């Protein structure tokens, strides 16, 4: 009871400090929320978030978050029909070929007017040239959770209207990939390239992404020893949301230098991290949301990195499972946070602060 009392004192101390600084705040500690407020809607909030296999296993569930737009949530029997000579289903302008154990794609399955194609959760290994070339109205393409290792240089030819592309959790090797492979995607806004770090051998080169000048949301995995976004990323002038996962070990002061216009940064499932520079966030002048989930670093260390955000307004700071002792708690490192640990946090006008499963008892 004394421990719980101390935790509540710390929690209330933090929330009161935040309240004094910016007049309102929300604090969530280990899923118990103290205080509340409304957050502003953003474009990404219009999308449906759901979980699927492929992410770090937490409490028996594989978690994967992705953004899904315009895919019908419920479809009546009257509106669904099977395409002739196809194993897929069509409703309105959506072709659903997901979870059918497919090993190849037949372009005849897709009418020219198709806007959405779901090919996720199959056994595909290859994306051949010109498979989608006549689909000039296609805006959404999900090919996640397959076994794709070979992508033809003209695989995305003709997809000038495509806005969302999900290639996550395949077996793509980015070594030797043509710099022009994504060049036809002139209107692409959302791209998910996260791969299984156990099979990924190299990072997606910036030269492949630099033509995507309208890209706003990028999800990517890094297996490099040092996390680095090269000068090619300076061309992505509209990039606002960056999600990073992987087995990278070091995040330096220069890691985010070329993606400094972000509004939202998500670091997730990075259990190999052993160093984060104390100036890691110094380049972010416009960041309003920071999420760190399942990172191999103690929350006290992360709180000490927040100093560049002092005196700023932020919509959310979300910390979930930040610990260097994921299996057994260390009584020296874990169990408490002090007022000194929160000295930078209390100088940030943050609408919502969450601290979940970070070994604070």
Image (spheres, grey):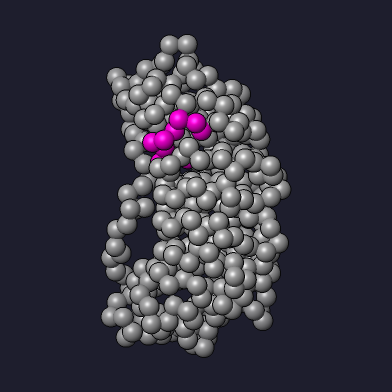
Q: Which of 126 and 48 is in front in this view?
A: 126
- In this picture, residue 68 sits left or right of residue 305: left
User: Which of the 4 image quadrants contains residue 359?
Assistant: bottom right
User: Which of the 4 image quadrants contains residue 172?
Assistant: top right
Residue 237 picture location, percent across and down: 43, 58
Residue 248 picture location, percent across and down: 66, 60
- In this picture, residue 89 sits left or right of residue 234: left
Relative vertical location of residue 76 with respect to residue 318 in this rendering, above or below: above
Q: Residue at x 44, y 65 (%)?
A: 261
Q: Is residue 310 magenta?
A: no
Residue 274 picture location, percent across and down: 69, 69
Q: Residue at x 64, y 51 (%)?
A: 203
Q: How many labels does the image show?
A: 0
Q: Nearer the viewer, residue 101 or 137?
A: 137
Residue 211 picture location, percent across and down: 50, 47
**From this viewpoint, is residue 82 visible?**
yes
Q: Which residue is drawn at 63% across and 62% down?
A: 227
Relative vertical location of residue 135 with respect to residue 282 in this rendering, above or below: above
Please identify the residue farthest to the top as the structure is shown. Answer: 85
Q: What is the span of residues highlighted in magenta in the rendered image?
A: 156-165
**From this viewpoint, is residue 272 visible?**
no
Report the predominant secondary structure element of the magenta stretch. Answer: loop
Relative vertical location of residue 123 with respect to residue 295 in this rendering, above or below: above
Quarter of the image containing the C terminus?
A: bottom right
Q: Which residue is drawn at 44% across and 50% down?
A: 213
Relative vertical location of residue 158 with respect to residue 20 in this rendering, above or below: above
């Amino acid at each position: 009871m004394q421990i719980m009392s101390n935790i509540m004192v710390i929690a209330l101390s933090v929330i009161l400090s935040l309240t004094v600084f910016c007049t309102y705040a929300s604090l969530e500690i280990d899923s118990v929320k103290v205080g509340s407020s409304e957050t502003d809607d953003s474009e990404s909030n219009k999308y449906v978030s759901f979980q699927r296999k492929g992410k770090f296993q937490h409490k028996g569930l594989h978690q994967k978050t992705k953004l899904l737009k315009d895919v019908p949530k419920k479809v009546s029997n009257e509106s669904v029909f099977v395409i002739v000579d196809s194993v897929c289903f069509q409703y309105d302008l959506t072709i659903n070929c997901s979870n059918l154990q497919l090993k190849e794609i037949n372009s005849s399955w897709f009418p020219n007017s198709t806007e959405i194609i779901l090919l996720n959760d199959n056994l595909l290994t290859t994306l051949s040239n010109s498979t989608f070339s006549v689909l000039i109205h296609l805006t959404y393409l999900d090919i996640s959770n397959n076994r794709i290792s070979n992508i033809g240089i003209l695989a995305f030819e003709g997809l000038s209207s495509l806005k969302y592309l999900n290639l996550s959790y395949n077996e793509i090797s980015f070594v030797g990939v043509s710099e022009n492979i994504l060049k036809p995607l002139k209107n692409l806004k959302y791209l998910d390239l996260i791969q299984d770090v156990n099979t990924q051998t190299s990072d997606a080169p910036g030269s492949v992404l630099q033509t995507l000048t309208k890209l706003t949301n990028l999800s990517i995995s890094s297996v490099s020893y040092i996390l680095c976004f090269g000068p090619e990323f300076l061309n992505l002038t509209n990039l606002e949301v960056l999600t990073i996962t992987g087995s990278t070990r070091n995040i330096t002061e220069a890691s985010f230098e070329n993606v400094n216009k972000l509004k939202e940064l998500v670091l997730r499932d990075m259990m190999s991290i052993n160093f984060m520079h104390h100036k890691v966030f110094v380049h972010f002048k416009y960041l309003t949301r920071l999420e760190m989930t399942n990172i191999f670093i103690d929350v006290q260390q992360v709180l000490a990195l927040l100093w560049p955000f002092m005196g700023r307004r932020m919509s959310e700071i979300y910390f979930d499972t930040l610990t260097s002792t994921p299996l057994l708690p260390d009584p020296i490192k874990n169990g408490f946070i002090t007022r000194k640990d929160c000295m930078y946090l209390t100088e940030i006008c943050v609408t919502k602060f969450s601290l979940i499963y970070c070994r604070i008892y």
